[in-house]
Image (spheres, helix red, strand yellow):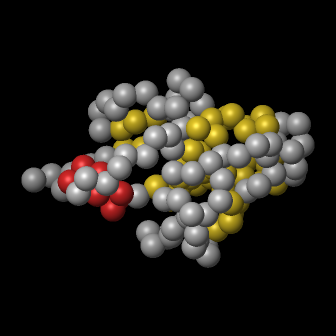
């Protein structure tokens, strides 16, 4: 994700639009994870349709969020959802994995539930 930001801003790489929110099961994300290779965690698949579009508001205070338009997942199975991720594609593993985060606490879901996810992405500099 960080390489993508640098490439878009400074190297002329094409911007991704839209981004998508997916759900993850238990496991630990690593900084080297990609959408194709993330051995420490598994994507949850027990929901209808594909990953949900990340509909964010304009950045403010060094962060950007979809809190006004949450990603809504119609759950079609039973699982414990540990967190979420943001990726450049609505399905599959050929795109860019931008970021992965765990919820404060995992959420048990079952068929018929709706899980709404707010994802906030923050930026920081080194203070110089």
Q: Is residue 16 something that shows in the picture?
A: yes
Q: Is residue 100 above or below residue 53?
A: below
Residue 40 horizontal/vertical position (percent):
61, 73
Q: Is residue 65 above or below residue 84?
A: above
Residue projecting furthest to the top: 68
* Residue depicted at x 29% and y 57%: 7
Residue 101 horizontal/vertical position (percent):
53, 54
Q: Is residue 30 above or below residue 56?
A: below
* Residue depicted at x 57% and y 26%: 69
Quadrant of the image for the N terminus?
bottom left
Residue 79 horizontal/vertical position (percent):
82, 54
User: In the figure, is residue 126 to the left or right of 54?
Assistant: left
Q: Nearer the viewer, residue 35 or 82?
A: 35
* Residue depicted at x 44% and y 69%: 31
Residue projecting furthest to the bottom: 39
User: In the figure, is residue 15 to the left or right of 41?
Assistant: left
């Amino acid at each position: 994700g960080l390489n993508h930001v640098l490439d878009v801003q400074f190297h002329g790489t094409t911007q991704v639009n839209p981004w998508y929110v997916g759900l993850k099961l238990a496991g630990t994300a690593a900084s080297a994870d990609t959408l194709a290779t993330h051995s420490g965690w598994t994507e949850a698949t027990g929901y209808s349709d594909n990953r949900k579009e990340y509909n964010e508001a304009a950045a403010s205070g060094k962060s950007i969020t979809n809190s006004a338009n949450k990603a809504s997942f119609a759950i079609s199975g039973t699982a414990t959802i540990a967190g979420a991720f943001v990726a450049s594609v609505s399905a599959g593993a050929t795109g860019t994995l931008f970021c992965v985060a765990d919820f404060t606490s995992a959420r048990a879901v079952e068929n018929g539930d709706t899980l709404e996810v707010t994802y906030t992405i923050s930026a920081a500099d080194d203070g110089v």
